[in-house]
Image: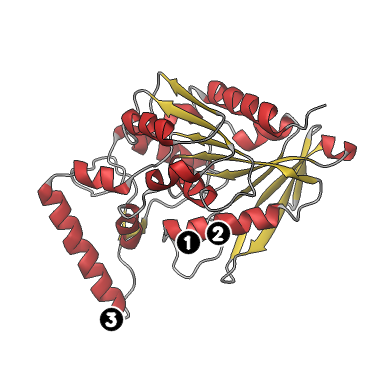
Amino acid sequence: MSSAYATGTYERIDIAFRTDDGITLRGWHFLPASVKKGPQPLIIMHHGFSAVKEGYPEHFFEEYFAAAGFGVLTYDPRSLGESGGRIRQEIDPFLQIADFRDAISFALTLPGVDPECVGVWSASYGGGTAVQALAMDHRVHCLVSTVPFLSGGAIWNTLPAEVRQNMLRMFETDRRQRAAGQAPQTVAIVAEDPASTPCILPTKNSWEWCMRVAAAAPNWRNEVTVRSLESQFCFEPMAYISRITPRSFLLIGAENDDLIPVALTREAFERARCPVKELIVFPCGHYSCYDDYFFQTAKASLGWFDRHLRPAV
C-alpha cells in the first residue's frame, strides 16, 4: 500500500499513532483539497464489530465526506487489521473506548484541522464505542451514530436460558485455560449454517455482508476471541447516552434491523439530552445503511456535519 493516494478533491495518507499503553494503531487520514484555504473540519470514524478500514465492499463513507471537503481520520482498532495489539482478534470495548479518545488526541495534532470543528461518524459496535467515549470526552462537537450497539445486557436477556448457560461455561473454560498460559479460544463471527457452526452474528444477512467484506478487505478475519463475546455482554452504551451533552447528535436507525432492535434505538434517542438532536429511521435492515441505503445514510450524515461543523460565514 502506498503512503498516499490522491484524487482531485482529497489525498489519502497512511498514518500511525500510539495509544496511552503503547499500542500502535494504523489508519488513513483523508486530507481535503480545501485545506489549502485554511484549517477544515475533521470527522473521526469508528466502524462496526471486527471491522477494518478497508471493510466496505462498494462505498466508503470516508471518501464521501472527504470529497465534500471534510478531513477524515479512520483506523483499524487494536488487535485488528494493520494495528498492533497483544492478543490478535480480541475486541475489548473498554480498551476501544480508551483508544478512541487517543485517536481524538492524535486527530487534533493533524495538519489542516480546525480543533473547534471535530465530529464523529460511527456505526454499529463502533456507534456504542463513540457514545460511551463521548460521554466522558467533550473535545468532539458533533456525533452521528448509525445503527449503534446500545446494550449487551438487552441482547443477553433475549437468549434462551440453555444458551446462556452454555456461554457461561465457555467463558469460564476460556478464562481457566488462559490463566494456565494456553492460547485464547476463538469463535466465528458469522457462519453460513449457524446451526452447525456457532457464531456471534447468526443471521443470513450477517453472513452475506461479511463475505462481501472478506472479498474487499483481506485483513478482515472471520474470528474473534471468546473473551470478545464475553465482553460484549458487559458493554452498556445506553447507560451513558444521557451524558453526551452538549453536542449535537444525529441517530440513524433501521426499522428492520435484526441485530440492533429499533426499539432500543428509539429509547436511546429519548434518553439523549442533547440540545440539538434528530432521529432518522430508514425502512431497511442493519447492513442496508452501508449498502442499499448508503447514499441516504451518507447524505443525512453529511447534512448534519455541514450544519454543525462548518464555521458560520
For the residues labelled 2 and 1, the Cα–Cα distance comes to 6 Å
Dot 2, crowdedness within 10 Å: few (<14), some or many (≥20)? many
Single out the residue that lies furthest toward the top. 283
Vertical relation: 266 (above or below) 162: above
Where residue 132 appears, as percent x and y from the top left, is: 47, 49
**Dot 2: what SS?**
helix
For the residues labelled 2 and 3, the Cα–Cα distance comes to 28 Å
Q: Nearer the viewer, mark 2 or mark 3?
A: 2
- Does residue 52 appear in the picture of this structure? yes
Label number found at residue 180:
3
State the image quarter where residue 114 is shown: top right
Where residue 5 appears, as percent x and y from the top left, is: 75, 44
Dot 1, crowdedness within 10 Å: few (<14), some or many (≥20)? some
Q: Are marks 2 and 3 in contact (CB under 8 Å)?
A: no
At label 3, which amino acid type do we have?
Answer: Ala
On-image quarter of the C terminus: top right
For the residues labelled 1 and 3, the Cα–Cα distance comes to 23 Å
State the image quarter where residue 25 is shown: bottom right
Where residue 183 appears, as percent x and y from the top left, is: 34, 73
Residue indicated by mark 2: 99
Single out the residue that lies furthest toward the left. 162
Residue drawn at point x = 79 percent, y = 32 percent: 9
Q: Are marks 1 and 3 in contact (CB under 8 Å)?
A: no
Q: Nearer the viewer, mark 1 or mark 3?
A: 1
Q: Are marks 2 and 1 in contact (CB under 8 Å)?
A: yes
Residue drawn at point x = 31 percent, y = 48 percent: 152
**Dot 3: what SS?**
loop
Residue indicated by mark 1: 95
- Does residue 214 appear in the picture of this structure? no
At label 1, which amino acid type do we have?
Answer: Leu
